[in-house]
Image: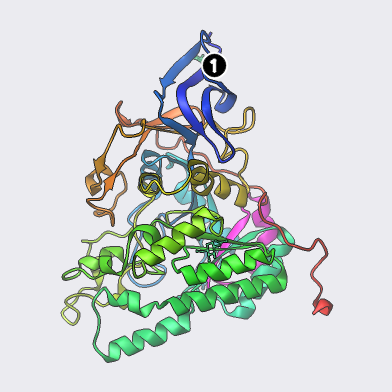
């Protein structure tokens, strides 16, 4: 019998804490040893991977992914289900997904939404997975279920400050944050001011401006900036951690950075679309620009991208997630083209299903940009998400005896260059917003709990549907309230 199940040798191992020439031994799905190169010579294993000087990192953790969601508003319906979305994830080096379990406004219970989403994911996943509950009906029943969610392994919720079908009033947001504080739940907030957006849409409609590019105009930075500041204010009143999702505007990031300097437990996320896309990507002939319609929208250009990169480098952003939100482009019933009609031959920007695919391209795009220090890259694409959402050190690290053997093995630098095309990808979407871009890296192997699930040159997708497990999550190891005292209204 062999001593180990798997050895990964000769790689440059990069974790959030260190970089070095280490060899890795895996047993029973866990990292058993992380030792200087050469220390495992002569040791027997069932399988050995020669990483040949390529980087070896903890598998990616993508904590913002929409799969198999019904049409919550408008006509758009997720193009990816748990099978196609999670297979796309592992092909792109991501071994853990946290997706959403959406509660509808007409549904009083969060636990019902959780049960329904478990059904959609069960036996379907190539990657490991968990869910954030989307709370769009913050009535007494939903609030009373937070404790039960924690027992079910769910330690995060998402709420919206915009979209009629999902939006909570400020008083409802306070109800959510108040109970989240008691139950040690991290609340993710989509921070855009819905009233500013609706008002701007009306102004554009009065001028008969309907092309996809007006989606950007209709979501002005001020809508994001105001809502971000309000979210920070509400959370600091309750003294509870929040994460502002998909921040696109450097001015919104400035509010976040200022709050962090005051010691507030405010966390933030950004996404590749705010590093690589601009308003110009929505300003294409005909309806083409609809492919890049997402909210908040890509901003003006270089300067915005620069501000967002800076926020990643200096820690304002805790995580770089994909916000994979897949819609077919050509589909005229539930895809982007569902909004084309005789009245609106180029569609109407207001009704275009909002979202872009990106779960598979997130890590390669960000690594190819060669902008972040390697340890920072690991931190924002894997480790921090695991810490923030209660999965560390099982996920997001390479801690012997504790971490699952989830690894992304890259090619040696300079060995590969690709022109990204949609046909390379494993999602169920008919386009990628990054078509034609040059990328310098792609995962050579993805390993999940010791099993090779992606081997680019040796069969590609070799994982099994259903191998992915649901992950029970604990409270955040990153975020807590500032005060240990109970919240008391008399303090104000
Ligand atoms: C190696 O493979 C054999 C046969 O499949 C299996 O029984 C064993 O548990 C594996 N692992 C080790 C460490 O031997
Ligand atoms: C960090 O980045 C944010 C977001 O771009 C910016 O507002 C802030 O000023 C930066 N902080 C430092 C210390 O550079």
Q: Position of residue 87 (x, y in %)?
A: 37, 41
Number of callouts: 1
Mark 1 burial class by Cα count in 10 Å: few <14, some 14-19, many 20+ = some
Q: Could you tell me which residue is drawn at 46 percent across and 84 percent down?
A: 195
Start-end of magenta stretch? 136-160
13 lies above or below 36 = below
Quadrant where the image shows the C terminus: bottom right
Q: Secondary structure at mark 1?
A: strand
Horizontal placement of 357 versus 37: left or right? left
- Label 1 within 8 A of ligand 1 by Cβ: yes
Q: Is residue 227 magenta?
A: no
Q: Is residue 158 magenta?
A: yes
Dividing the picture into quarters, in which one does residue 94 lie? top left
Horizontal placement of 273 versus 60: left or right? left
Q: Is residue 139 visible?
A: no
Q: Position of residue 112 (x, y in %)?
A: 56, 60
Q: Could you tell me which residue is drawn at 52 percent across and 65 percent down?
A: 103
Q: Position of residue 309 (x, y in %)?
A: 45, 57
């Amino acid at each position: 019998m062999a001593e180990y199940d798997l050895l990964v040798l000769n790689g440059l191992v990069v974790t959030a804490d260190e970089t070095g020439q280490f060899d890795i031994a895996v047993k029973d799905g866990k990292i058993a040893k992380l030792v200087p190169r050469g220390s495992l010579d002569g040791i027997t294993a069932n399988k050995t991977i020669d990483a040949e000087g390529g980087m070896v990192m903890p598998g990616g953790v993508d904590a913002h992914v929409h799969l198999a969601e019904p049409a919550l508003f408008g006509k758009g319906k997720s193009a990816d289900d748990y099978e196609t979305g999670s297979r796309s994830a592992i092909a792109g080096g991501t071994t853990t997904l946290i997706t959403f379990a959406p509660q509808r406004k007409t549904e009083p219970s969060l636990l019902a939404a959780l049960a329904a989403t478990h059904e959609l994911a069960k036996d379907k996943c190539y990657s490991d997975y968990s869910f954030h509950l989307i709370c769009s009906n913050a009535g007494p029943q939903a609030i009373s279920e937070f404790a039960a969610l924690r027992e079910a392994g769910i330690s995060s919720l998402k709420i919206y400050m915009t979209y009629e079908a999902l939006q909570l009033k400020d008083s409802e947001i306070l109800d959510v944050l108040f109970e989240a504080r008691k139950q040690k739940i991290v609340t993710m907030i989509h921070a855009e001011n819905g009233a500013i957006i609706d008002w701007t849409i009306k102004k554009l409609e009065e001028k008969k401006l309907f092309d996809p590019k007006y989606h950007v105009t209709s979501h002005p930075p001020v809508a994001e900036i105001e809502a971000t500041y309000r979210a920070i204010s509400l959370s600091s009143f309750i003294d509870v951690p929040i994460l502002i999702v998909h921040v696109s505007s450097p001015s919104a990031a400035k509010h976040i950075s200022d709050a962090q300097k005051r010691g507030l437990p405010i966390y933030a996320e950004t996404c590749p679309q705010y590093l690589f896309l601009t308003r110009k990507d929505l300003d294409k002939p005909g309806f083409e620009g609809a492919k890049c319609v997402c909210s908040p929208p890509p901003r003006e250009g270089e300067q915005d991208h620069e501000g967002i990169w800076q926020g990643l480098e200096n820690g304002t952003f805790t995580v770089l997630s994909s916000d994979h939100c897949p819609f077919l482009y050509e589909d005229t019933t539930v895809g982007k083209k569902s909004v084309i009609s005789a009245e609106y031959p180029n569609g109407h920007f207001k009704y275009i299903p909002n979202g872009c695919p990106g779960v598979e391209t997130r890590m390669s795009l960000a690594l190819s940009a060669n902008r972040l220090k390697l340890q920072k890259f690991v931190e924002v694409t894997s480790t921090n998400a695991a810490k923030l959402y209660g999965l560390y050190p099982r996920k997001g690290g390479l801690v012997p005896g504790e971490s699952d053997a989830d690894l992304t093995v890259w090619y040696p630098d300079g060995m590969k260059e690709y022109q990204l095309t949609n046909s390379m990808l494993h999602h169920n979407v008919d386009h990628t917003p990054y078509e034609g871009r040059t990328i310098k890296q792609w995962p050579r192997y993805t390993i999940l709990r010791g099993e090779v699930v992606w081997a680019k040159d040796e069969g590609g997708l070799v994982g099994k549907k259903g191998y992915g497990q649901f992950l029970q999550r604990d409270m955040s190891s990153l975020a807590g309230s500032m005060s240990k005292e109970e919240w008391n209204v008399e303090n104000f």
